[in-house]
Image (cartoon, helix red, strand yellow):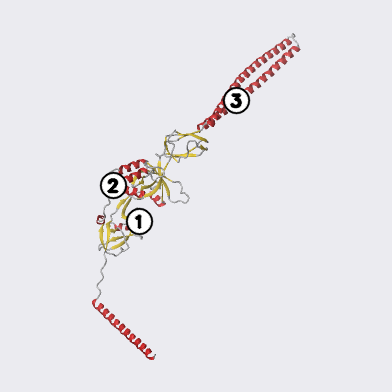
Amino acid sequence: MRFFGRALVGLFLVALTIGLLAMAGNTVWSAFQARLADAAGAPPPRERVFTAEVMVVEPVTATPVLTAFGEVRSRRTLELRAPAEGTVIELATGFEDGGAVQAGQILLRIDPAEAQSARDTAGADLREAEAELADAQRALILAGEDVTAAQTQAELRQRAFLRQQDILERGVGSAAAVETTELAAATADQAVLSRRQALAQAEARVDQAGTALERRRIALAEADRQLAQTELVAGFSGVLSEVDVVAGRLVNRNEQVARLIDPDALEVSFRISTTQYAQLLDADGRLPQVPVRVVLDVFGLDLTAAATLTRESGAVGEGQSGRLLFARLDETRGFRAGDFVRVEVEEPPLDDVAVLPATAVGANGQVLVLDDADRLEEVAVTLLRRQGDMVIVRAPEIYGRNVVLARTPVLGAGIRITPLGAADAAADVSDIPETIALDPERRARLIAFVESNTRIPDDVRNRMLQQLNEDTVPAQMVARIEERMGS
């Protein structure tokens, strides 16, 4: 065991010696390598030069275009409601969604049996009132003649009384005869009074008959109006929508059965921010009636129409912001109420500005400008408008100098670049064909899809089919149609 332990200690000492010798050799080798490196010397580093697209910026007069999105709606929309309750017995031809109607056309009829019966009853009552008035007028004439006869008789009785008094004064007559004639005269006067009362009653009867006649006439007019309300008449020429009635249906009074839209009186409503609204105002602070361009994108075929800015909303709705503007369409061909369109409004021109790509301006509002040594320096600019992928800025310091069109993370102040002109960069981009040729199968699928799509206006569909039947078809339109098809 003692021999075995000594052998292990010796083996351990040998391994330790070998490890120390290896460590010493590595130290010597590292020192030798460091000495060689110091003797040779490192090569000087080379400056890295990047390539960037630049453009000479010149001051111009730019007209900003305000772009917003809105909805087309009709300025004349009428809710068609049932004027009376009852069963619909007749509908006009074309009384359906999309049907065109003319002003004054009868759209539907409601069963007029009850209204006709009420009208006939009112007519009979009117004739009865007319007969009553005629009878009262005849009675009035007779009462007047009766008063005249009574007055004549009273005058005769009065003259007889005066004659008896004269006879009595001459001593020929008697007092009894005078009293008799006086009593007869008083009786005649009483009869006149009674006849006058009868005349007054006859006049009152005529007045009452006249009042009753007017009431019957009013009742007849009301019956005629109720009878006329069994027919629904179009107030103006237009197109029907939201039709919800068929012949034989029972409708209630004032129930909505359809909507009548005037397709020739269209306008577009669109909302803009308060800042954009302030940019549109004129010197007097009023909204000018400037031209507006309305664009409807239909499978790559832009349908445009001219419009005029007319007015703004009188109040900001609850939970809304900005301003709601309205523009009247000068041409409505191809547009329908409810279309989602793009609106472009030209703002007042801006003088002494520069138009640059949006990628040329950094988040800090600075652009990179090339100096005489092809090195970049940062210059602050004033951002006036954003126009899609372009911006309108004002910075007299960059006019006449080369500006980097697209900033990248590796570009900054002091970096040296190799300038590449915009024309040279554009030459490296392959042109995309504007029109393409279609094989028969692909052409047939596109035509079938367009014909089956009911949301496309008829005139736009005809133009699209005409273009699809030509030898070459616009590539943008084909791409839009196939995108909608899901291919």
Mark 1 or 2: in front is: 2
- Reading the image, the residue beneath label 1 is 383
Q: Position of residue 122 (x, y in %)?
A: 56, 28
- Horizontal arrangement in the rendering, residue 260 relative to residue 479 (left or right): right
Q: Residue at x 69, y 19 (%)?
A: 190
Q: Position of residue 243 (x, y in %)?
A: 45, 39
Q: Residues within 10 Å of mark 3 (few under 14, many from 20)?
A: many
Vertical placement of 286 versus 183: above or below? below
Amino acid at dot 2 = Asp
Q: Can I make out residue 22 in this image?
A: yes
Measure the alpha-carbon separation of dots 3 and 1. 87 Å
Where disc 3 sits, the SS reads helix
Lower position in the chain sequence, tag 1 or tag 2: 1
Amino acid at dot 1 = Leu
Where disc 1 sits, the SS reads strand
Measure the alpha-carbon separation of dots 2 and 3. 90 Å
Residue furthest to the left: 40
- Reading the image, the residue beneath label 2 is 439
Q: Nearer the viewer, residue 374 or 351?
A: 374
Q: Marks 1 and 3: in contact by CB < 8 Å?
A: no
Vertical placement of 136 versus 460: above or below? above
Where disc 2 sits, the SS reads loop
Q: Residues within 10 Å of mark 2 (few under 14, many from 20)?
A: few
- Reading the image, the residue beneath label 3 is 209
Which disc, if any, is residue 188?
none
Lower position in the chain sequence, tag 3 or tag 1: 3
Q: Position of residue 248 (x, y in %)?
A: 49, 36
